[in-house]
């Protein structure tokens, strides 16, 4: 079965952005789809790369004009995706997206290969969250979100093609890249013009 959208999901601070960046470097023909958000941009983030940052009225206007899909609200901020990015292309793409959206992508009849990343160490995840300079309330919300994501995984494991454990070390990165090498067919990895993800 041909699949041309790879989804990366998991709780906050589990390493989703790290793995997406590593995959793009090692598989440059895979294009990242960047989501829209109304949350404030964080230090070190780049608008258009880390996310497409906008105001709530701007996002509401796009939504009213039927330009968006998967519009969600988390921690008081809105998130969404341009409809054309997800539905009007055959090229191979990768998306860092909420696990709550996987069923909707499937309902949209999109050809996805879904990966859920979970932490090998809960304490390490908490440490990384603390390093984000969150308020105590924000920190607690994300910890609650972590437990909710693990509960979701237990209830909906069938939605994911792969559940990957991140031990926050180089071997985890190499393992993920090895998995991608195995996922992509030989024709794809040898063809610089590839735009489809084909499972072996």
Image (cartoon, helix red, strand yellow):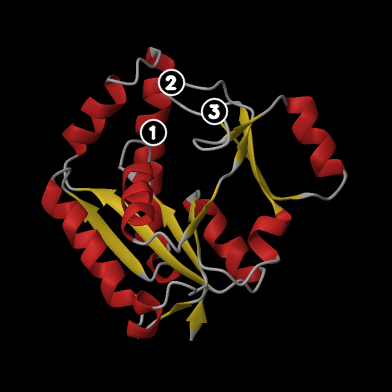
**Between 72 and 30, the one nearer to me in the picture:** 30
Closer to viewer: mark 1 or mark 3: 3
Residue 25 in picture, x, y percent from top left: 34, 52
Q: Which residue is drawn at 20% across and 38% down?
A: 122
Disc 2 to disc 3, C-alpha distance: 8 Å
Up the image or down, 84 lies above or below 38; here it is: below
- For the residues bearing labels 2 and 3, Cβ distance under 8 angstroms: yes
**Between 113 and 141, the one nearer to me in the picture:** 113
Q: Residue at x 43, y 65 (%)?
A: 114
Q: What element carries label 3?
A: loop
Q: Is mark 2 on a helix, strand or loop?
A: helix
Q: Which one is earlier in the sequence, the residue at label 2 or at label 3?
A: 3
Up the image or down, 143 lies above or below 138; here it is: below
Is 58 displayed left or right of 53 in the figure? right
Mark 1 is surrounded, within 10 Å at the Cα level, by few (under 14), some (14 to 19) or many (20 or more) other residues, namely few
**Between 150 and 126, the one nearer to me in the picture:** 126
Residue 9 in picture, x, y percent from top left: 42, 52
Residue under label 3, please give it.
75
Residue under label 1, please give it.
144
- For the residues bearing labels 1 and 2, Cβ distance under 8 angstroms: no
Q: Residue at the right extreme?
A: 65
């Amino acid at each position: 079965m041909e699949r041309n959208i790879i989804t990366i999901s998991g709780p906050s601070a589990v390493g989703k952005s790290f793995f997406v960046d590593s995959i793009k470097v090692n598989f440059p023909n895979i294009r990242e789809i960047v989501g829209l958000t109304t949350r404030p941009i964080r230090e070190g983030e780049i608008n258009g790369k880390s996310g497409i940052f906008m105001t709530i009225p701007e996002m509401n206007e796009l939504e009213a004009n039927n330009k968006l899909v998967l519009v969600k609200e988390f921690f008081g901020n809105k998130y969404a995706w341009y409809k054309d990015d997800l539905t009007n292309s055959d090229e191979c793409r990768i998306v860092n997206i909420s696990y709550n959206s996987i069923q909707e992508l499937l309902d949209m009849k999109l050809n996805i290969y879904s990966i859920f990343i979970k932490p090998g160490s809960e304490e390490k995840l908490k440490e990384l969250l603390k390093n984000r300079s969150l308020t105590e309330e924000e920190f607690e919300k994300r910890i609650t979100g972590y437990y909710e994501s693990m509960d979701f995984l237990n209830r909906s494991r069938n939605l994911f093609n792969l559940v990957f454990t991140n031990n926050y070390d180089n071997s985890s990165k190499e393992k993920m890249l090895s998995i991608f090498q195995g996922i992509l067919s030989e024709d794809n990895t040898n063809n610089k013009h590839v735009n489809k993800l084909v499972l072996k």
